[in-house]
Amino acid sequence: MMTSDENLPENPTLGARFERLVAIMARLRAPGGCPWDREQNFDSIRPYTLEETYEVLEAIDQRDYTGLCEELGDFMLQAVFYAQMAQEEDRFTIADSLDAINEKLVRRHPHIFSDGDAKTSDQVLKRWEEIKAVEKSARGGAPKGRLDGVPRALPALMEGLKISQKAAKAGFEWPDFEQVLEKFHEETAELAEARARGSQSEMEDELGDLLFTVVNMARWLNVDPEQALRRTNAKFRARFAHVEHSLAADGKTLEQSTLEEMEALWQQAKSLPKSR
């Protein structure tokens, strides 16, 4: 493997570029390397992994392909960082991770790499889950529940979507969207009742039920609830910024303005041309 001090050849292969990243990370973690990098462990790096993931998503949302190029590099660094720490503990190497994903992709796409047959996306996903179940069974261990494969560390909206998808595949499902809407109204009423009783614990429970129902509404509509909320957050940011900047142009702050003034500017912001 090349060292981080070696220059890349004139036309380096993808492999050479990746090996350079691995070598740089190894050098940063080695004795005499970067003090910060050497202090990190699996737990301390986790927040950066989440941060880099959302920066990738933000670049995609903004169609900022220059930024996406850079963010994907940061994203790949996270995998190399974890693998380097694992190698130092004699657990596995980045090569093992690459072998694992390469073999998994080939194994789970028999319609491409073998004699399997799948003509639609639904058929592909069904076969993927079947192969995944066989793999888990082959690894042994006690049988797990249907929802145990969904990581608890996922963002709550994403976790809710995945567990409701798995439950629906098992037949635990509303017969139509209208009944999902009925459930939404039911949960809204129960939240209002909990608020009337003044119980903070009940309100939290009922609000959670309401949010979970909204996630299921999104699933029925084939909408990603996480992405839908991100879009709304971005829309709110833009409109609120318009209100703030418009007031500032008149020499006023938000605190110095009336709700009516802010509402008028908010409606004005809604009529402005949309941009990504």
Image: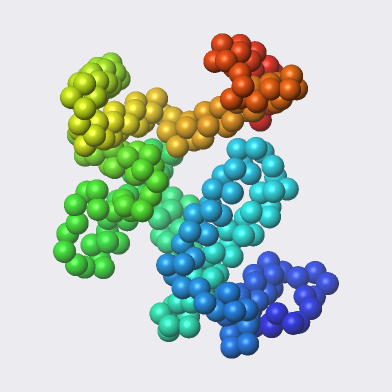
- Regarding residue 196, the answer to whether it shows in the image is yes
Residue nearest the observer in this picture, 140 or 49: 49
Q: How many marks?
A: 0
Q: Quadrant of the C terminus?
A: top right
Instruction: Tell which residue pokes out farthest to the front in this image.
Output: 256
Against 27, is 125 above or below? above
Against 162, is 195 above or below? above
Q: Residue 224 lies in what quarter of the image?
A: top left
Residue nearest the observer in this picture, 258 or 157: 258
Q: Is residue 189 left or right of residue 250?
A: left
Residue shown at 83% from the left, 72% from the top: 10
Q: Quadrant of the N terminus?
A: bottom right
Residue nearest the observer in this picture, 206 or 91: 206
Instruction: Tell which residue pokes out farthest to the bottom in this image.
Output: 31
Residue shown at 77% from the left, 75% from the top: 8
- Regarding residue 19, the answer to whether it shows in the image is no
Residue 57 horizontal/vertical position (percent) = 56, 44
Residue 202 horizontal/vertical position (percent) = 20, 33
Q: Is residue 221 left or right of residue 232?
A: left
